Image (cartoon, grey):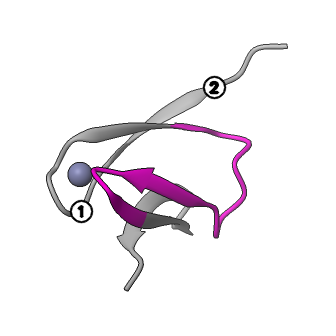
Amino acid sequence: MLTVVQMVSCPLCGEYVPVDEDTPPGAIFEHDGKRLRLEKEFGAFVLAPVE
Ligand SMILES: [Zn+2]
């Protein structure tokens, strides 16, 4: 089974983070020592910093 990966830009540093398309919104990513929450807006993934 082919896994599609989207490259989603980090809101803090602009780097691109690979995210499997199957990942449910609300998933938490660890990146640069910060926590980012995956959200889906208008069918596209975005990452939001977790306070
Ligand atoms: Zn970053």
Q: Which mark is residue 50?
A: none
Q: Earlier in the sequence, mark 1 or mark 2?
A: 2
**Left or right: 34 with respect to 44?**
left
Q: Quadrant of residue 20?
A: top right
Whether the magenta-drawn stretch holds residue 6 is answered as: no
Q: Which residues are magenta?
A: 19-35
Few, some or many residues within 10 Å of mark 1 (<14, 14–19, 20+): few
Per the image, label 1 sits on a secondary structure element best described as loop
Amino acid type of the residue tagged 2 in the rendering: Val
Residue 4, percent from left and from top: 63, 25
Whether the magenta-drawn stretch holds residue 24 is answered as: yes
In this rendering, the answer to whether 46 lies above or below 7 is below
Q: Which residue is under mark 2?
A: 4
Q: Quadrant of residue 11?
A: bottom left
**Left or right: 12 with respect to 8?**
left
Taking the view exactly as shown, the residue that stands out farthest to the left is 13
Per the image, label 2 sits on a secondary structure element best described as loop
Q: Mark 1 and 2 residues: CB-CB less than 8 Å, in contact?
A: no
Mark 1 within 8 Å of ligand 1, using the beta carbon: yes
Mark 1 or mark 2, whichever is nearer to me: 1
Residue 46, percent from left and from top: 42, 61
Amino acid type of the residue tagged 1 in the rendering: Pro
Question: Residue shown at 27%/50% (left/top)?
Answer: 32
Few, some or many residues within 10 Å of mark 2 (<14, 14–19, 20+): few
In this rendering, the answer to whether 22 lies above or below 10 is above
Question: Residue shown at 41%/78% (left/top)?
Answer: 50
Q: CA distance from mark 1 to mark 2?
A: 22 Å
Quadrant into which the C terminus falls: bottom left
In this rendering, the answer to whether 26 lies above or below 50 is above
Question: Residue shown at 85%/13% (left/top)?
Answer: 1
Q: Which residue is under mark 1?
A: 11
